[in-house]
Amino acid sequence: MIRPNKLTRRRFIKGSVAASLAASCWPRGTVLGANEKIGVAVVGTGGRGGAHVKQFNRGDCQIVAVSDADRKRMDGAAGKIKDRQVVKHQDLRKIMEMKDVDAVVIATPNHWHAPATILACQAGKDVYVEKPVAHCIWESRQMVKAARKYKRIVQGGTQQRSDPYYAELKADLKAGKYGEIKLVHCLKHNNRGPIGKVTEPQQPPSSVDYSLYCGPAPTVPLMRKNFHYDWHWQWNWGDGEMGNWGPHIVDDLRNILDWDDVPTSVVAAGGRFAWDDNGETPNIQFALFERQGFKFVVDIRIIPAKKGVRAASTYMKSRGHNVIVCEGGTVRVGRGGGAAYDKEGKKIKQYKGTGGRGHDTNFVKAVKSRKMEDLNCEIEVGHQSTMMCLMANAAYRAGKQATVEQVKASMKEHQDALDTIDSVVKQIADNGGDIKDLKLGPKLTFDNKKEVFTGENAEEANKFVRYEMRKEFAVPDEV
């Protein structure tokens, strides 16, 4: 059962940051001078964090601090800054006390994204936070509230918002270049492989402070071989591939179609097939969403096209992220670009992109201008794209085992969903998996204003809208 965290902002700060925080940590000025360097702290120094250390160690910025619950990783990141001393703290809350930190870049595991962002906002810092911006819907909205209350610049890490080719594609679609949009299929197919299996709790690396690592999440026994990265596939810390790549592809779709809200219904299905490992999240998951009468599928798979091959599935002939079927042809686009094809399959236009290079530069620009409208993925945008993925996860987790025919019956009104199910069934069988049943969530309705599930089956799904956090690290009711 999910219990509200009866925390106020006062208790949050008292339990999280030194009492001197409020008086000492505000930025050096409302607007930085044109030639003044932005003091940056990178929190979470793994793959993405390491990349951010490089990105923000440049002329208009200065890395002044790094933080990671893993001391070894933190030391390695600090060692990359050769020209000066960098402050190091395993406890990210200490970073918030530093006067010379103007902006915090957050690349921790998912469960720390919201608490760290809110702490930074309360401490007068601007924030760049990786996707998914949050681990549950409720805390994601709390991040937006904190950004507004403290007038902070907060950028979501869906960097494809900074790829200029999307503006060209949107203009073509709006002008009717390919005719009316008939169908959209949003997908990401990878081949990741199982994470291995242990039968007894594992010890974290000696360099890791496990309590700090878990932070707001329960300090559950560690049941995985690889400490780093594989947290993505366990619910305590991660949100599966739906929360990993999902925010990118869903944000692309919302950007292309100019949506400023999220769907109001969802039904999801999937499971973890063909692997015997410690992963908890599905390796195949698909959801049928509906927004203003328009239905579309979000389709996530991380098993190979078939057993023994390295290739991932190319359902709908796409290696990209979004397939947009129009009256006059089909557009297939993803990170870095894509193309449009006529009804006979001939390429009629190439879209060349950058993959979102410059998303960090866009953030720096907004930090200096103090205009949140300068951001390509302001936190409200990141919140909504993350929320869609969290809706799909809640719908899946509220489900029960069902036969393939029952899954089809739940999505019978949408042919692309039925075709997706057939494709999934074949792919699982081609991987030697047992396809007697899948986990099927109930059809859910979602209130866009209250950001909770409503109506039939809502109670079970709403258990995942907010989770019970450890008090010392919990996001407060009042930010």
Image: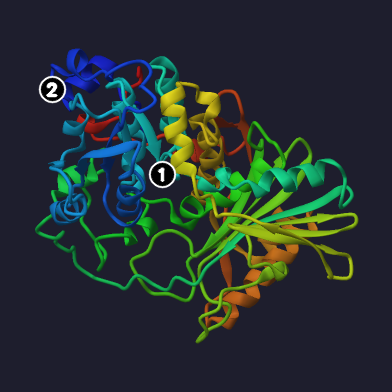
Q: Secondary structure at mark 1?
A: loop
Q: Residue at x 19, y 12 (%)?
A: 23
Q: Quadrant of residue 456?
A: top right
Q: Quadrant of the N terminus?
A: top left
Q: Which sits in the foreground, 71 or 306?
A: 71
Give the image location of residue 343, x and y in percent.
89, 65
The reply to whether residue 8 is visible in this rendering is no
Identify the mark at residue 18; answer none if there is no mark: 2
- The kind of secondary structure element at disc 2 is loop
Q: Assign the C terminus to one quadrant of the image.
A: top left
Number of residues whose C-alpha sits closer than 10 Å to that of mark 1, classed few (under 14), some (14–19) or many (20 or more):
many
**Vertical order, 460 against 407 (above or below):** above
- The residue at which mark 1 appears reads as 130
Give the image location of residue 16, x and y in percent: 19, 27
Q: Amino acid type of disc 2?
A: Ala
234 relative to 347 in the view: left or right = left
142 left or right, relative to 99: right
